[in-house]
Image: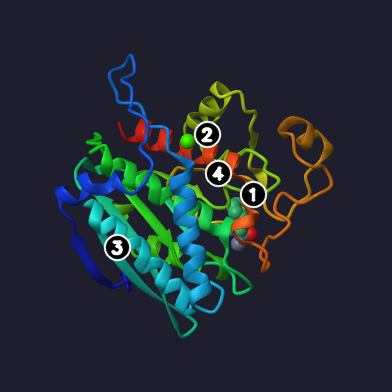
Amino acid sequence: MSRRAALAAATGTALAASLLTVAGAQASSPETSAAGAVAAPDIPVENVQRHLEELQAVAEANGGNRAHGQPGYRASLDHIKEKLDAAGFETTVEEFDQAGTTGYNLIADWPGGDADDVVMAGAHLDSVRSGAGMNDNGTGSAAILEVALAVAAGDLQPAKHLRFAWWGAEELGLVGSRNHVAGLSEAERGQIGAYLNFDMIGSPNPGYFVYDDDAPLEKVFTEWFAAKGVETAPATESDGRSDHASFQEAGIPVGGLFTGAGETMTQAQADKWGGTAGEPFDKCYHTACDDMSNINSTALDLNTDALAHAVWELSS
Ligand code: DPN
Ligand code: CA
Ligand code: ZN
């Protein structure tokens, strides 16, 4: 049985959703595809960068990091939860224990859709202790937040149920996501048709890696990038290394995006992506310099738009 506790659940109002885009850049109007489904909006990368700047400020106000067990982690979670609540999401804070320290996941459900057919998008919200963790994993956290807010702003009414998640203590071994999956009943696990993971999607010397764990989910991303003229590669380095592994181990189909961590970019990769061979994808991986200056905005923009596309397409 589950040891997690639902600490808080709040339902926002439709009115709040209508106020959402006032402060940020407007997403472009969605177009209707030939099939009749509404296409995802182009997400303004400035909005994602604004969330990142706020997470950087949270770190700076809390001893420089957003790590599990440190005040910057819970402050990051509260900051994101407030925005989701105002937009009309049903949020839940899950509590778990990690070697005597309390950790937290944030789950946000978009009301409606088929509860037996859930599409999830997740990112870990914790940083390591050495810094603010802007690329790892402010990028994934900010991107799924902005896509969730776009769902609300567009009052998306998908056929499937949409759920977003921000995981705690990923850096200590996928602890939050493992705890979440362990707390689901067999039936609840069976209701999740897809889990998409976004961990490090704005690396300064970016590669465009797509998780290759499930062919249909992989295709949603690879076709989107191909249409933009961006070559992708299978994310073989990501196997078992982020929160998707918790879902994969439970038999849930997983997908996701990744722009590379501490590994060195090869000459062939540099030729393909226009980066610097012999340098890491992220020279600040798990170090103090993983701050706002450690983000490639083109990679962040492309990956966020791809994420929005996947959410719209898979939930329709
Ligand atoms: N989450 C990081 C790690 O555990 O090393 C980096 C990473 C992200 C690795 C995505 C694989 C995939
Ligand atoms: Ca965009
Ligand atoms: Zn990491």
Mark 2 vs 3, N-terminal side: 3
Mark 1 vs 2, N-terminal side: 1
Residue at screen point 71% across, 46% down:
205
State the mark number for residue 300: 4
x and y percent of residue 299 in the render? 59, 41
Q: Is residue 196 above or below residue 91?
A: above
x and y percent of residue 104 in the render? 39, 71
> Which residue matches tag 1?
203
- Between marks 4 and 1, how big is the CA–CA gap? 8 Å
Task: Tell me the kind of residue under disc 2.
Answer: Glu
Dividing the picture into quarters, in which one does residue 270 lie? top right
Task: Tell me the kind of residue under disc 4.
Answer: Leu
* Residue extending furthest toward the top: 34
Helix, strand or loop under label 2: helix
Q: Is residue 214 left or right of residue 286?
A: left
Label 2 neighbour load within 10 Å: few <14, some 14-19, many 20+: many
Q: Is residue 153 left or right of residue 256?
A: left
